[in-house]
Image: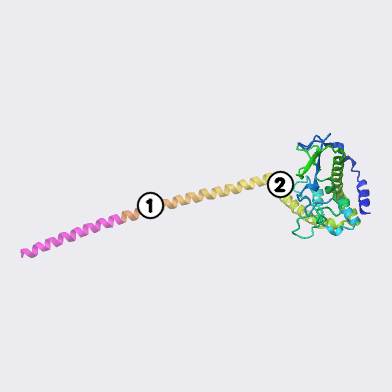
Amino acid sequence: MKLDELETLATRMNLENILVKPEDVIMSMENKGDLENTFPMPTCDKCEKKCCPPRVAISLFDAARFIDDGLEEDTAGTFEGFVKLFLSDDGRDVKLSHAHMNPKSSDAEDCVFLGEDRKCSIYENRPGICRSYPVAIRFDENKNKLAIWMGGCQNYEILPDKSAFQTLLENAVKDYNEKLKSNALLMYSRHELRSMGLGKYMEDEWAILLDYNKKNKDMQMQITDLEQVAERLRAPQDYTSIMQRLQVDNDWLKERVVNLEKEVSEQRERAHSIILELTTQLSEQRKLMESIRQGEERGKKGFWRG
């Protein structure tokens, strides 16, 4: 049985110190009973809400159960991102995805196992998340303790049924622990998982490693380039050559400015000379015109006089 093989493989990893016990969970939910004598219990028979979506996420252990029950074709998707999480330094910007129950069609609104009577057709073999719904385990607002979460259910009654609620809580803890073990196995025991026949649910880590290696080489080249630049900046001879080049550029600019000033001065003198010459010519032309005018006046007087 795949489930037994998976449990054996997880046991070898000695994960007991990270698994959760029911007594570790904060028993507090506002306006949902005191959780000592009264408890919230879903009233599914009276509910018309659709709480069984088409792509319910499953754990690796759920996938093994589906294989054992001959329901593998009703699952789809892969557990992606775990290789990147393993390779990353801090886990930031790593998106994880999970396998899920395969819907009947792309536009399906309900789970593939939900019958026309709105009842689960695999109730005894349903996934962990369905067994504990609507109770789930989440980190509290301080991110340091585990608390009960029941935000998905809108139809429930406050009842004095401790044993029924305790079953929901135990199922929620079991589902949470199976997800913890699944994550560890997906990060550290991928070869064994493939050997067990669970390769369908796993991404191609070889392609990820090649891409990671390429990015690592590109980053290393950038680091090398930066180190070379830093080394050049640290070298005293570089400062000397830079100062020499700046001095040469500065001397060239000074020489260019002097030449421009000299050229402007020469152009100014040339313009002044041309203006003076034109003024002289204009004065001489005026004298000539005055002489011609006087000669004409004398000629007119002599003509009439004769």
Q: Eyeballing the image, is 82 above or below 292?
A: above
Residue drawn where x is 88% and y is 51% of the image: 124
Element under label 1? helix
The amino acid type found where label 1 is placed reads Glu
**According to the image, label 1 marks what residue?**
269
Q: Residue 272 at x, y = what percent?
A: 35, 52
At 28% from the left edge and 55% from the top edge, which residue is drawn?
280
10 Å neighbourhood of mark 1: few (<14), some, or many (≥20)?
Answer: few
Which residue position is annotated with label 2? Answer: 231
Can I make out residue 215 in this image?
Answer: yes
Q: Amino acid at mark 2?
A: Glu
Instruction: Work out whether 62 lies above or below 160.
Output: below
Residue name at image x 60 percent, y 49 percent = 245
Residue 193 in picture, x, y percent from top left:
89, 54
x then y, percent, for residue 235: 69, 45
What secondary structure is the magenta-colored segment mainly? Answer: helix
Instruction: Identify the residue at the far left of this view.
Output: 306
Residue 147 visible to an observer of this rendering: no
Q: Disc 2 or 1, which lies upstream in sequence? A: 2
Quick one: 260 or 94, which is closer to the camera? Answer: 94
Q: Find residue 15 and report its image quarter.
A: top right
Q: Is residue 9 magenta?
A: no
Cα–Cα span, label 2 and label 1: 55 Å
In-front residue for pair 66/238:
66
Identify the magenta region.
278-306
Residue 290 lies within the magenta run: yes
Seen at 94% across and 49% down, the residue is: 8
Q: What is the quadrant of the C terminus in the image?
A: bottom left
Q: How many marks?
A: 2
64, 46: nearer the viewer: 46
Q: Position of residue 97 (x, y in %)?
A: 79, 52
For label 2, the crowd category at 10 Å Cα-Cα, with few meaning under 14, some 14 to 19 and many 20 or more, is few
